[in-house]
Amino acid sequence: MASSNGAGQDGIYSISHFPDKKLLQLDGKWEFYWQELYTPDDFRRETVQQSPQIIEVPNTWSKYIIGGQELPMTGYATYRLYLDFPKEEAGTTKALYVPNISSAYTLWIDGVVGSKNGVVGKSRDSMKPVNTPKVVQFEVQSNPIELIIQASNYSQRKAGMFDPILIGEPEMILQFRDKKIIFRSVIVMSLVTMGLYHLVLYLFRRKEHSLFFFGNVCLLIALRATLLEEGLASYILPFLTWELAVKLEYIGASLGVMFVSLFTYTQFAKDMNQKLRNTIIIVMSAYSFFVILTPAVVFTRTMIHFQVLIILIFLYLISVYVTAILRKRESSLLNTIAILMLFGTVVNDILFFNNIVKTTELTSVGLLFFLFTQSIILSKQYSMSFMRTEKLSQDLAILNASLGQQVHERTMELQHTNKELQAANQRLNEAHRSRSEWIHNISHEISSPLTNIRAYTKGMLDGVIQSDKNYIQLVYEQSLYLSRILHDLHDMTDMENRQIRLDIKSVDIQEYGYKVYQKYKWDLEKQGIDFEWKSSLFDQAENRFVLIDEVRIEQVIVNLLNNAQRFVHENGKIVLELTNEQNEKVMIKVMDNGIGIEEEELELVFNRFYKNGNHGKAHSGSGLGLAISKEIVEYHNGTIGVKSKKGEGSCFYFTLPFKV
């Protein structure tokens, strides 16, 4: 057996092991029988007279050369491959992910039909094309296992096995399929929502044609993205025939390019040549009618020419956006960045669908980014227009009352307002970047428990995991973790928006600190931790008062105590201490003799979603506790910090000003 996975010899794929959390591609050298539809019985009875051709899979068979000539696009053939498994895999269950095999196929696994798509035939009339990815499970009962695939194509430009078949554990195959569908579903739903929203806006303001073009682009690309993911299309649009689905896919691309061009014209009409705009409309409309009137076997052969045309159109659109930048048009820079990203994804898809690169379809993602930026720009334009209308109405009312006396004053105010708008725009851009990072962190933090919940529930639904109390408890704990994250996010959002309400009272900080100490002493000592209280404040009670929200400051102390108890060993020690600081401040310290913090991590501990790389006790924190504590302390005009050495413990502290 070969030491590594792969086609060790012609027609045999040797598997030495199955990598953890990875799938294998059955790429390599397969047996190929052109213009023959053999069954397992034919090979078993040795009635196969044709010698096999050894070809590379995946590839469309029109790229194969047999007898010195390239094979035609239309025809039928039989593929054959042996899977050589390790001895320890005997009796286990594996799964195949069978993608689109054009345009119909039948798969046998060790003589048993494992999967079928459409009807395989020897002519266009006798076959029925269907494109739906399949997950096929089978048991390793013999070694090697024989795979036989009959395929026929009389419908499109790609033929045979042009995408790799994947093999792996059933759970991994199902997760791979579900991730693809979920990823595409999110994009499709986002595009549909954006499209419908802007079409509704257009109904209320018919003069804004950009809203109509924008909404149609969203819906057309959503339709195309759905059709490209055959697994998703089979769920959402099961009533579509194969021929109609392919027509809609091509029409979605052609009309999508046309509406993108029209939308560009509405944005930068002075920078776009009107004759070229009309030419694009005529050509894309004519191509759409060509797709409608011809069968797939005809119009799919024009894909290369269509792709070249799309690239030329996008290059022209990019030149329009660059011209707009040079002429300093409003929002031209953001538009150019968006169109460049969209162009990059279009080029990727052209290379991908022509089997030049091994990536995936990305145009829908690029369009989502492009359309999202346009949503921002359109929303900004409407908001600014409305704000300007309100401001002008107010100014006109005042100017009508005393125009002559206030001309100079209003001129100065407008200049000042312009500066404020520029400053506000800069703050908004900074807030947008911060919000993008914030959303990324939230998505990253929430994705893990969601993935766990989905995996456990999917496993229980499929019978892979037994529905017992332990797994239900795991799902429940993951949901509690999500609830804690959302609660912390709510607190953080209120603080960022300055919406938090503090119940400020005058409090003797020494008595308050000692009460907090007594409140949590028993719980910490129950965990085997020595919890100690210290205070070196003034003896006079009147010198120990601070203005605080008792609940929020207790939240800060508890966060620091919880953080400390995670990193102390059994029989560890935590000290809560109050000391006088300069400038009429009190310092509250939480010290521990735990494992400490690396020096390079000290500046990061108060960042949102930061979790210490050291391995403390297990916990389900959101990574927001210290960040929230920092916000609370700063609300009280205090400061917060940490001192630590690796292996020598840590000291988290914060200061509060005494009441004057």
Image (tube, rainbow, N blue to C red):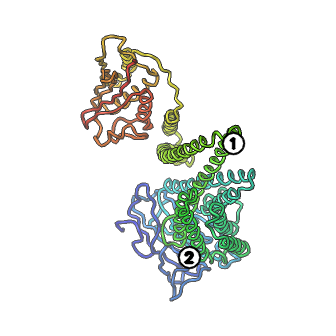
Image quadrant occupied by the C terminus: top left
Q: Which quadrant of the figure has residue 627?
A: top left
Examine the rendered structure and indicate whether residue 140 appears above or below residue 653.
Answer: below
Q: Secondary structure at mark 2?
A: strand
Instruction: Compare residues 611 and 506 and report the one nearer the observer.
Output: 506
Q: Which mark is residue 331?
A: none
Instruction: Compare residues 256 and 272 and report the one nearer the observer.
Output: 272
User: Where residue 105 sits in the image (x, y, percent)?
Assistant: 60, 70
User: Where residue 479 sits in the image (x, y, percent)?
Assistant: 52, 37
Left or right for 477, reference 225: left
Left or right for 196, reference 48: right
Q: Which quadrant of the figure has residue 555?
A: top left
Mark in the foreground, 1 or 2: 1
Image quadrant occupied by the N terminus: bottom left
Whether residue 44 is visible: no
- For image coordinates 70% across by 71% down, the residue present is 285
Q: Earlier in the sequence, mark 1 or mark 2?
A: 2
Q: Which mark is residue 78?
A: 2
Q: Amino acid at mark 1?
A: Leu
In the current view of this chain or complex, which residue is farthest to the bottom? 68
Q: Which quadrant of the figure has residue 506?
A: top left
Instruction: Compare residues 444 and 549 and report the one nearer the observer.
Output: 549
Examine the rendered structure and indicate whether residue 70 appears above or below residue 520.
Answer: below
Q: What separation in Å lies between label 1 and label 2 (alpha carbons)?
A: 81 Å
Examine the rendered structure and indicate whether residue 555 appears above or below residue 292.
Answer: above
Q: Secondary structure at mark 1?
A: helix
User: Where residue 641 sits in the image (x, y, percent)?
Assistant: 34, 32
Whether residue 76 is visible: yes
Q: Which residue is mark 1?
A: 396
